[in-house]
Amino acid sequence: MNRLLLVVWCMASVCVASEPDLAGSEDPLSLERFANSWIVEYEDDQALLAREFIVSRVDKTRRQVRAERKIRIEARQQSATYEIPRGTPRQEVVDHYVALLGSGPLFSCSGRDCGRSNHWANHIFGQAVLYGPDLNQFYLAVERDDRLIGIYIIERGNRRVYAHVLVIHPEQPLQGGALGIAGGLDRNGYVVIDGVEPLANGSFSAASQQRLAAIAPTLADFAGRDVYVVCHIYGASDLDRLLDAARQCGTSAADALAADPGPRLVPFAAGPMLPRSAERSRVELVLPPHLREE
């Protein structure tokens, strides 16, 4: 009788029993997992390699799976795939990770807005267990504490729910929202590089050089395109000296921002010729085809 009551109770309220994790695995970045889930696949690749982190939907064009936007960066990589207890609604898992990481995402999508689940499962993550109906998928990409974190959640056709957690550990810190530079350039056609101010002679401090170096790999999506590196320098010197300093600034900044893959960086010396209300020496990136009227 007691056994019968237990079976009925389990059917009504879903018996939750966590399986053991895959041997040697751990929660990437110690991120809080969904309650009672367990790790079925795990990778901890400490090799410093060029990694690609997806921040857009994924599509197949000309027989190749491609993302509209991705961040290429030298980094180490850790990932875990969790199986969720049977009977758990997929949305509960989504809500868990959104509450944990969802503030200010680099990108998120749900259902067919993400593209094909097959592409994510087999081409992006290399995990066939993550393949399911396109309508049943969710992806979240965030930057936290100089780490890139991707969460992919799928409910398969057999109602099993899985969550894949990917953490990219860059070699260099993502200083001052370096990833936002590429986003601003893509949206508006220009962006001021905060935290970088050329000196009066057109050179840069060590901190500014480090900032430019951190931004360089985030410009990979503009490979093969012309991006202008515009230097504005103000001061008490005469016009010719300010323009000479701006030319030096443009060349130095372009060198620091160069990466492979990356855009064609074209130095442009504006000097003091394009003043704004706040005449602060600065470096801007300009992508003319994307310029928008304000």
Image (cartoon, grey):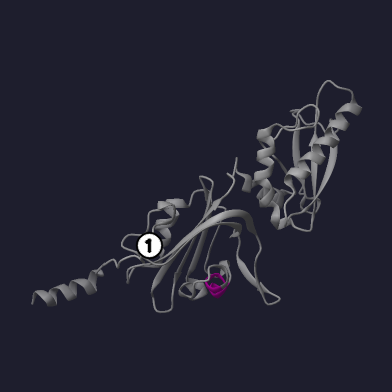
Residue assigned mark 1? 24
Name the residue furthest top. Answer: 236
What is the secondary structure assignment of the residue under circle 1? Answer: loop
* Residue at the image point whose x is 54% and y is 74% from the top: 122
Which residue shows up at 68% across the image and 77% down it?
63
Q: Position of residue 228 (x, y in %)?
A: 80, 46
Left of 251 or right of it: where is 131?
A: left
Q: Is residue 54 magenta?
A: no
Where does the image place residue 97, in percent across and percent down from the top left?
Answer: 43, 56
- Left or right of 204 in this view: 135: left
Of residue 220 and residue 273, the one placed in the foreground of this image is 220
Q: Amino acid at mark 1?
A: Gly
Magenta span of residues: 116-122
From the viewer's perspective, tell me whether residue 128 is left or right of residue 57.
Answer: left
Q: Residue 129: horizontal and vertical position, in percent?
A: 45, 74
Q: In which image quadrant can residue 277 be found? A: top right
Q: Is residue 17 above or below residue 254?
A: below
Quarter holding the C terminus is top right
User: Residue 28 or 176: which is nearer the viewer?
Assistant: 28
